[in-house]
Image (cartoon, rainbow, N blue to C red):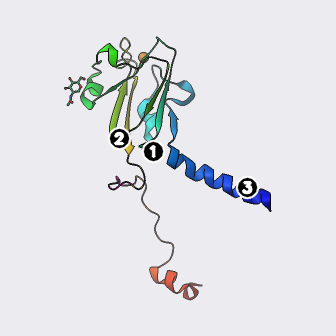
Amino acid sequence: MASTKAFIIIAMATVFLPSILGKEFIVGDSTGWTTNFDYQAWAQDKHFQVGDKLVFNYKKGAHNVFEVNGTAFQQCSIPPANEALTTGNDVITLATPGNKWYICGVAKHCALGNMKLPITVQPQLGSLSPLPSPSPAPAPSAPVYCSRKYKHCL
Ligand SMILES: *[C@@H]1O[C@H](CO)[C@@H](O)[C@H](O)[C@H]1NC(C)=O
Ligand SMILES: [Cu+2]
């Protein structure tokens, strides 16, 4: 049936396209980029990969976004103002694997308002040196010999 075929194609595209095109993460989801939100917890269960995008949504002028190193992140030291992203809809493409740190440089939002986001970006699938997957592979449900002589397992 044509509609079944179309459904399968759409379903497969939905599964596979994001891994090719990259996903878009709205930082803080509907809360956006603001004070007193736990961005560490927000990032915890997410899988960031090279090619994905981070979107920081906030009222222009109320906040900004700096990418910093781990030291500046811990100490909430704010880089020169000309390094800030300030549009209120800042899109950052995650171009390289590794740890990334983002802070807000307005007032004491980083130190007192918890506006700090640390993430780990995984290499793209098919990369030569993938980091270990966070979730362990499921244990085989049957002994190995069963996959070769399947009838014996019935
Ligand atoms: C981290 O960033 C700060 C400010 O941009 C810089 O002064 C410092 O040297 C950097 N530290 C490292 C370890 O790269
Ligand atoms: Cu802020």
| CA distance for labels 1 and 3 | 29 Å
What span is colored magenta in the figure? 127-133
Residue at x 40%, y 54% (from the top left corner)? 133
Viewer-nearest of labels 1 and 3?
A: 3
Residue type at the position of mark 1: His
Ligand 1 placement by image quarter: top left
Q: In the picture provided, is 117 more to the left or to the right than 9? A: left
Q: Residue 112's x, y, as percent?
A: 36, 17
- Marks 1 and 2 close (CB-CB < 8 Å): no
Residue type at the position of mark 2: Thr
Q: Which mark is residue 96?
A: 2
Residue type at the position of mark 3: Ala
Picture quarter containing residue 67?
top left
In this rendered view, identify the residue nearer to me: 147 or 92: 92
Residue at x 42%, y 18% (from the top left corner)? 64
**Dominant SS in magenta:** loop
Disc on the earlier residue, 3 or 2: 3
Q: Mark 1: which secondary structure?
A: loop
Q: Which residue is mark 1?
A: 47
Question: Badge 1, how many Cα within 10 Å: few under 14, some, many 20+?
Answer: some
Question: Badge 3, how many Cα within 10 Å: few under 14, some, many 20+?
Answer: few
Q: Which residue is mark 3?
A: 6
